[in-house]
Image (cartoon, grey):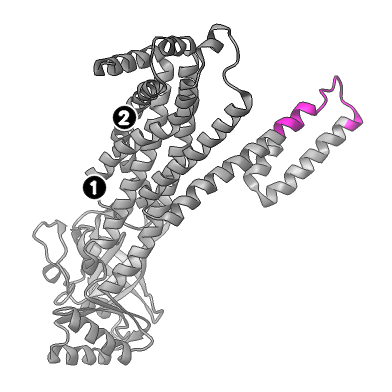
Amino acid sequence: MKASMYFNYTTRSLLRGGQRSILAVFCVAVGVMAIVSLQLVGQMINGAFTNNIREANGGDIAVTSQTPLKPSDLTFFDNLKNKGTITAYTPTISGSASTSLASASTESFTLESVDPGTFPVVTPPSFKTPTDGTIAGLLKNNQVVVDQNLIDQYNKKVGDTLTVHASTSTGTGAVMLHVKIVGIVKNVGVFAQSNDFMLISHADYQAADPKLPLPYDSVYVSTADKAHTDQAAKAIADRFPIANTVTADQALKNNQAQVDYIKKFLEIAGLLALLIGGVGIVNTMQVLLSRRRVEIAMLKTTGYRRFDLYLLFGLEAGLLGLVGGVVGAGAAIGVSYIVRNLVQQVFPIIIPFSLDPVIIGGGVLIGLVTALIFGLLPIVQAANIRPLNVIRELPGGHRVGSIFLTIGLLLLLSVLFCALAIVILNNVIWGISAVYGAFIFLALLSLVFSLVVLVISVLPVPERFSIGYLALVFAGVVVSALLFHVLPTFGGLLLVV
């Protein structure tokens, strides 16, 4: 058979399929869109947590303590600096602050008191306004810098003044500040994970209440290399045992563990959508091929072998998967942007938008492989059609053999999809658990709905109200109400029924 025959027959068959072909493409596209968009979001979250971890940690070492450090405690860090163990350090005071809005309601934000001469010890922050602004040049004479979120929240602008009521995170006191906004800092670098914050100098913070000691709750340290980081971290932990001392490497490991769980959750959610799309492919391919039983019988009588039919229908399924993969991967770009914005609104985290061409290209490949896997069952069933049975309009195949063939194909389908899941999740245990856990859940869900349908089918249809019917309805309401306390969603549905 000529190679052009494969392509021509496949494309004509898909065009004749019309809406059913579009439905198969839609099933693939939805599954690919879900898994690619969630993978992209997971990659963005991974970048937000792990890239520039030194800036996110505030330095090579971050020391935080619920018991405030006194100014005299800073001499220890001066000694480390003089010895060359650390290169720089900066103490900060963080607390909750609020101010009255025009609507007379009160919202809180983070007020951070810093030393303008040493903060931060990592890359200096970037300013939106003024573009050439610096911490040392702006934080003086009760002037403050804020981020864009705080500007939007309070409907303020650079040059406005406001009264701030602040309390320290250690609970050592509260102050009232009259400040002027002189700069807007970007949420990048050291402020990448921060939202709704205001920076003020230590001098202006203490001037609001000279009797209030400066209760430092954090000290950020920079070092020359990893060896000095480990040495300084050990010395700090020995000197301040109740403080939490975290190096940039430790922060990276902690963040990576959290991000890995988030990425796995998003990828499993995408796999479930891909599985549902695969079920749609099976049903659509079965309908497409069952309508061509006579055509398949004619192909077999003219000399086409079973292998030729496998190749023809496999190309058909592959073309559906390829088109669906391209459409789904393209749509995933827009969906990932929306999901990323939703995650930013739910969690206080800034997630830079980025696209990974490997994930997008892999989505197209996933669509192709998924269509081939779930098209396997209808393809093999169609290729096993006996021409004589079609001519005589007899049911195809031996019933027992057909049942065993279907069971074997379903098992093979589950194994192949499980292998695909293992590749996507890059974890054998996660892949097997996700796929077969989903199969068990769908089987139980199908059983529950079958029982519901069975119960509804055997219930009598009353011609008029009776005591027995009312008692049955009352019992159903009571059972639904009890289930609602245990399983709110399922109980609510039963209550509606």
Depth order, front residue of 9/35: 9
Q: For marks 2 and 1, give the one nearer the viewer.
A: 2
The residue furthest top is: 391
Return the x and y of residue 316 as percentages of the image width and height: 36, 22
Per the image, label 1 sits on a secondary structure element best described as loop
Q: In the figure, residue 106 lies in which quadrant?
A: bottom left
The residue depicted at 48 percent of the width and 49 percent of the height is 434
Binning the other alpha carbons within 10 Å of mark 1 as few (below 14), some (14 to 19) or many (20 upward) gives: some
Dot label at residue 322: 2
Return the x and y of residue 246 as percentages of the image width and height: 31, 77
Per the image, label 2 sits on a secondary structure element best described as helix
Binning the other alpha carbons within 10 Å of mark 2 as few (below 14), some (14 to 19) or many (20 upward) gives: many
Dot label at residue 450: none
Q: Which residues are magenta?
A: 452-468
Side of 475 where 100 appears, left or right: left
Asked if the magenta segment contains residue 205, the reply would be no
In the image, residue 331 above or below residue 60: above
Quarter placement of the N terminus: top left
| Three-letter amino acid code at the position of disc 2 | Leu
Q: Circle 1 sits on which residue?
A: 354
